[in-house]
Amino acid sequence: MSEDPIALFDAWYAEARKTEINDSNAVALATADAEGRPSVRMVLLKGHGPDGFVIYTNRESRKAGDLAVNRYAALLFHWKSLRRQVRIEGSVTLVRDAESDAYFASRGRDSQLGAWASDQSRPLDSRETFEHRFAEMQARFEGGDVPRPPHWGGYRIAPDRIELWQDRAHRLHERRLFVREDGNWNEGLLFP
């Protein structure tokens, strides 16, 4: 068994990419506001490596507001068909503009336009208002590339704790907890 939790995650994630029917990269992101009130929502993992796990969003959203005042977050992957989950906790930094630009350019055009049209986490008077704003963005960028909005970009969660959980019979689950200390991963094998 590997002593590197990132390598273990890579192997599990590769398996999930092959077996999960929908959104194998779906992950629950937990944040907390300035008063410590937690909030959790599903997002999509768009990159990962030894330096962290990357998600993208509107930087004026509620989650972004939470991350502006509390630079720690938690992620939870749950791959039901594999009977596995991975918990990740760590500090959060902004992804560099060049990296955000590159990812944004890889998105479908309608997703790019949606990023311009959406005031994520803020209410609108009607669905028609949003659709009208989307049509305005289609007209604005017709015939050209859609640049990344200045209020949109990535966040990187640099893990200091990773727990890999495997379902076992009779609720005798297996947990492997890795904690980063002084740049090195230390492991403790846990059970229920």
Image: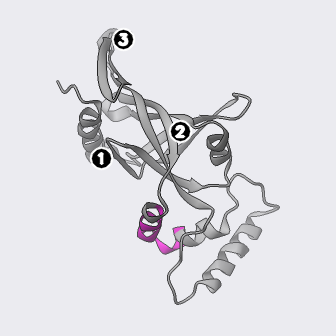
Q: Which corner quadrant of the image does residue 83 belong to? A: top left
Assign a secondary structure to mark 3.
Answer: helix
Q: Earlier in the sequence, mark 3 or mark 1?
A: 1
Residue underneath mark 1: 17
Image quadrant holding the N terminus, namely: top left
Based on the picture, tell me whether residue 133 belongs to the magenta stretch: no
Is 149 situated left or right of 7 in this image? Answer: right
| Vertical comparison of 78 with 46: above or below | above
Residue type at mark 1: give it: Arg
Residue type at mark 3: give it: Arg
State if disc 3 and disc 2 touch (CB < 8 Å).
no
Image quadrant holding the C terminus, namely: top left
Assign a secondary structure to mark 1.
Answer: helix
Assign a secondary structure to mark 2.
Answer: strand
Mark 2: few, some, or many residues within 10 Å (few <14, many ≥20)? many
| Vertical comparison of 18 with 127: above or below | above
Mark 3: few, some, or many residues within 10 Å (few <14, many ≥20)? few
Is 27 situated left or right of 164 in this image? Answer: right
Residue underneath mark 3: 171
> What percent of the width, then of the height, locates residue 23?
41, 48
Is 181 situated left or right of 63 in this image? Answer: left
| Magenta residues, start to end | 100-111
Mark 1: few, some, or many residues within 10 Å (few <14, many ≥20)? some
> What percent of the width, then of the height, locates residue 45?
43, 48
Residue underneath mark 2: 29
